[in-house]
Every structure is written in C-alpha cells, then in structure tokens.
Amino acid sequence: MITVTIIGAGNMGAALASLAITGGNPVQVLARDEEKAQVHPSAATGVVGDAVTGDIVILALPYPAVADVLSTYAGQLDGKILVDLTNPLDFATFDSLVVPADSSAAAEIATQAPASVVLKAFNTNFAATLASGTVGDAPTTVLVAGDDADAKATLIALVEAGGLAAVDAGSLRRARELEALGFLQLTLAAGEKISWAGGFALTK
C-alpha cells in the first residue's frame, strides 16, 4: 500500500483515483475547487495549496497549469515520486508541442522539481481506457519512463494492483517519444479518426 495524491480532478484525475483505490491505496485529490475534487467517495479531498499527503504525487493537469502548481508546492515535493501525465500540446493550433524538440514536458518538470523523482506515465492512455481496462480487445497498458528503477517499480505495482498492465518504457529520456505518441493519439481522436475510448494498445 502506498499513499497517492492526485492534483487535478478532471477525467484523468477521476480515473486514476479509482485505479489507485481499487488497488487498496489511500488517495487524496486536490483541485482548485474542493467540490470538484470529490471524484470518488473513498478519496480525501482538498484544494491546491493544502498539504500533500501522498508518497506518489500525480499531476493530472494540462501542461500549462503545471508550473504554477510546482511553484505552489516548492520544496514540499522533495523526495516524492512525481508522475507527469501531460502532453504539452500547443492548444492554440493543436498541431505542435510547446517544449523543445530535444526535450519533453517530463524533463522540464524534472528541472523545476530537482529533488523529486519524476516519472512519465499515463500520457498515452485516455481516461476511458483507464476506467474500462481495455483498448478495443486489448488490455490497457500504462507505459512508465524514468531514471529511478525503484520508483518505476512502485508505480508499476500500483497500476497492476488496480487491474491494469504496466511496462517499464526506459529512462526519462523516453518521455520525448511517449509525448510524441500521446500527441498523435490526441490529434487522431480530435480529428474523429479514433474514439476517446480507443487509442494505441500494446500487445506481446
């Protein structure tokens, strides 16, 4: 059992709260509006700025909102596993990423929170596939990238306890490829080429 804090209460935040609670983990959900943080009856709720109780902190936010949250919690996330699920799209054009081509949102977050253990995960999964456990006929698989093997194993165990599959996708440098994949999947869904309950699946 590991404690989890989810910052953000949209569809992804709700799906991840359910996943973690299904696996038997205490969950705290923080949002700008505490009423919106009530995404699961078993989750503790609060507002952004409240003390973080989780050993794993998941940023279930749009990328433009991350910097402000990290500033709010400066120094308070040290030593915690910090999970980035963002896809850093240019929301004005929906046709490019807003991070340098040789970097990633996860790398930028690691620079802003150097005393946290940053992992990239969940950005290639739509909320509906996290909730259903399937992508078409295939099981939902969460790809996890990061430089700390123990942290990755902890997050993978949490995902598997919640009933999904998870795969170690390599070092944090692989976040760049994961974000490119997430970007492509989002544009396909936005263009109605696939549904928001579909997406890419991993088979063995």
Image (cartoon, rainbow, N blue to C red):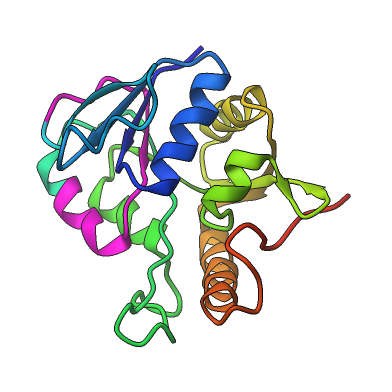
Which residue corresponds to the image point at 58% horizontal and 19% vertical from the top-left?
Answer: 23
Quarter occupied by residue 132: top right
Work out whether 92 lies above or below 39.
below
Q: Is residue 122 left or right of residue 96?
A: right
Residue ID at (24%, 38%): 36
Q: Which residue ends up furthest to the right in the rendered image?
A: 204
Is residue 66 a member of the stretch shown in magenta? Answer: yes
Q: Is residue 84 above or below residue 90?
A: above
Look at the image and say whether residue 20 sits in the magenta stretch: no
Residue 156: x and y in percent read 62, 32
| Residue in front for this viewpoint, 111 or 13 | 13
Position above or below: 197 against 8: below
Q: Mark yes or no: residue 128 visible.
A: yes
Q: Residues in magenta? A: 50-69
Classify residue 91 as left or right of residue 127: left
Counting from the top left corner in percent of width and height, residue 184 is at 58, 75
84 or 39, nearer to the observer: 39
